[in-house]
């Protein structure tokens, strides 16, 4: 145990030193060839190595090449820095190493509290058993859409679990043109088929067009197809747009569709000052996917599926072999009955620690800080002569593009090609990190602000880095 204690203390120092100094170095740099070869081609040792020696390797070969998301000027994708509480408590979950499929121990019991807290934060109804933690929103989406599929087929006198989908009228899923790819993957994995996913157009603010949705449902129903679910977004990854949730809920109710909301990134945006009206209708959803490992900074991976009717999810997944019958279980059963995982890690501990450390006020402060900076960046873009704002700021994402000083062209002069090349050029410079996308048929730059220590000065550095990268590329 002496080796373990010494190694644990050394690991704690390594973690604390990394988090303390991460903002002082480059945001990201390519991995040198020598370290790349070590990371990818090393052989498994014949004999075990001491923990102290392994920690030396971690310090010199692994911690030196981070993704960059711990840095205040990392604005790429939707990747947050780790919460200090989550980083401290995750090793304790590893030390306990339970399977949180169920049972009378701390893991599954604490998960019930964490799921309830998350539901309360975003104002989602939470009946007992109405949710579980997952590896991320992609798995949460599979849980939610499988529940929707099972409810729809049972209502038709058909059991998708027993009989599959062959012979049943095609089940149609409606997803915004700005909807996340995990919705399409889930449809494919659940046997719905890519052709049964309808892409609903968006309006000028990149929100789902409700009139188009209504028309598409009517057309499909008249053709003998089976509309069963509409998936809206509460914060898209491209622009942070929030679909008109209340109006979509009305359409879903009229047609008996399951109403799912992808709030993986953006659902917590409801806590920003004055933001609640934009999220009206979120509480009417049948299911909501969100990711504590995004805005909250819970160490990856931790997603959450929230379900308004837990019986629907249990009907989609419950399968209890004789060796897992637990006479001590309550009426809710085990978490393993509500999703595809049997062995489940102790995700609740790092999430509980993060939420407890922040408190409701701290979560709201984080959301307000980051959404405020996104609006500030949008104002800086609009005030500059060489940038163009592409979408309204709703959450903490700002979508814009670089253009030559004074140019009014949106697509001419090679601006698409230039904006497509800028993110990688900025990343290589090491002083900031952003990513690109396509928005409204246009190559765009996008920043997602999640770091509690990001400042307005960091935003100015970002814009200067984009200008410098564009200048280099234009040579």
Image (spheres, rainbow, N blue to C red):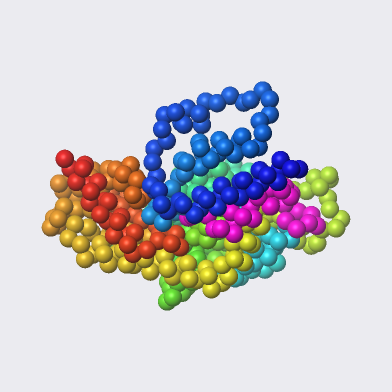
Q: Nearer the viewer, residue 440 or 100?
A: 100
The answer to whether one can see residue 197 in this image is: no
Q: Residue at x 23, y 48 (%)?
A: 468
Is residue 294 a member of the stretch shown in magenta? no
Q: Judge from the rendering whether residue 124 lies leftward or rightward of residue 386; answer left or right.
A: right
The answer to whether one can see residue 110 in this image is: yes
Q: Nearer the viewer, residue 220 or 303?
A: 303
Q: Nearer the viewer, residue 473 or 123?
A: 473
Residue at far right of view: 327
Magenta extent? 80-107
Figure disc tally: 0
Q: Residue at x 37, y 63 (%)?
A: 455
Image coords of residue 190 (percent x, y): 57, 45
Q: Quadrant of residue 247?
A: bottom left
Image coords of residue 444 (percent x, y): 29, 52
Image coords of residue 81 (percent x, y): 49, 55
Q: Residue at x 58, y 70 (%)?
A: 359
The quarter of the image holding the N terminus is top right
Q: Judge from the rendering whether residue 330 lies leftward or rightward of residue 87; answer left or right.
A: right
Q: Nearer the viewer, residue 361 or 410?
A: 361
Q: Judge from the rendering whether residue 14 lies leftward or rightward of residue 426; answer left or right.
A: right
């Amino acid at each position: 145990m002496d080796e373990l204690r010494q190694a644990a203390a050394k690991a704690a120092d390594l973690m604390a030193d990394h988090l303390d100094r991460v903002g002082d170095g480059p945001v990201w740099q390519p991995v040198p060839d020598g370290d790349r070869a070590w990371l990818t081609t090393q052989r498994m040792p014949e004999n075990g190595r001491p923990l102290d020696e392994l920690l030396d390797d971690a310090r010199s070969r692994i911690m030196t090449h981070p993704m960059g998301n711990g840095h205040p000027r990392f604005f790429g994708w939707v990747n947050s820095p780790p919460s200090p509480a989550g980083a401290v408590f995750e090793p304790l979950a590893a030390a306990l190493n339970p399977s949180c499929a169920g049972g009378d121990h701390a893991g599954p019991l604490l998960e019930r509290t964490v799921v309830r807290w998350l539901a309360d934060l975003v104002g989602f109804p939470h009946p007992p058993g109405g949710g579980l933690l997952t590896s991320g929103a992609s798995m949460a989406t599979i849980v939610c859409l499988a529940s929707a599929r099972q409810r729809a087929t049972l209502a038709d006198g058909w059991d998708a679990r027993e009989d599959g989908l062959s012979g049943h009228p095609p089940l149609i899923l409606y997803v915004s043109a700005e909807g996340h790819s995990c919705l399409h993957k889930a449809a494919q994995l659940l046997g719905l088929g890519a052709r049964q996913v309808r892409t609903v157009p968006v309006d000028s603010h990149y929100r789902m067009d409700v009139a188009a949705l209504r028309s598409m449902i009517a057309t499909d129903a008249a053709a003998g197809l089976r509309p069963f679910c509409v998936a809206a977004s509460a914060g898209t990854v491209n622009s942070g747009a929030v679909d008109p949730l209340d109006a979509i809920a009305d359409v879903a109710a009229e047609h008996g569709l399951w109403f799912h909301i992808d709030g993986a990134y953006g659902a917590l945006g409801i806590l920003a000052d004055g933001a609640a009206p934009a999220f009206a209708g979120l509480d009417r959803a049948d299911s909501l996917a969100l990711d504590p490992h995004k805005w909250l900074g819970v160490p990856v991976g931790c997603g959450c599926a929230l379900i308004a009717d837990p019986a629907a999810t249990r009907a989609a997944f419950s399968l209890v072999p004789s060796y897992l019958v637990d006479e001590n279980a309550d009426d809710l059963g085990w978490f393993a009955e509500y999703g595809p995982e049997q062995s489940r890690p102790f995700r609740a501990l790092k999430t509980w620690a993060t939420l407890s450390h922040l408190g409701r006020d701290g979560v709201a402060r984080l959301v307000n800080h980051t959404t405020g900076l996104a609006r500030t960046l949008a104002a800086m873009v609009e005030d500059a002569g060489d940038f163009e704002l592409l979408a309204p700021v709703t959450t903490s994402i700002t979508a814009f593009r670089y253009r030559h000083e004074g140019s009014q062209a949106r697509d001419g002069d090679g601006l698409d090609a230039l904006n497509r090349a800028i993110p990688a050029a900025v990343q290589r410079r090491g002083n900031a990190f952003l990513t690109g996308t396509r928005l409204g048929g246009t190559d765009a730059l996008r920043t997602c602000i999640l770091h509690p220590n990001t400042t307005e000065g960091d935003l100015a550095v970002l814009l200067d880095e984009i200008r410098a990268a564009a200048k280099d590329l234009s040579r």
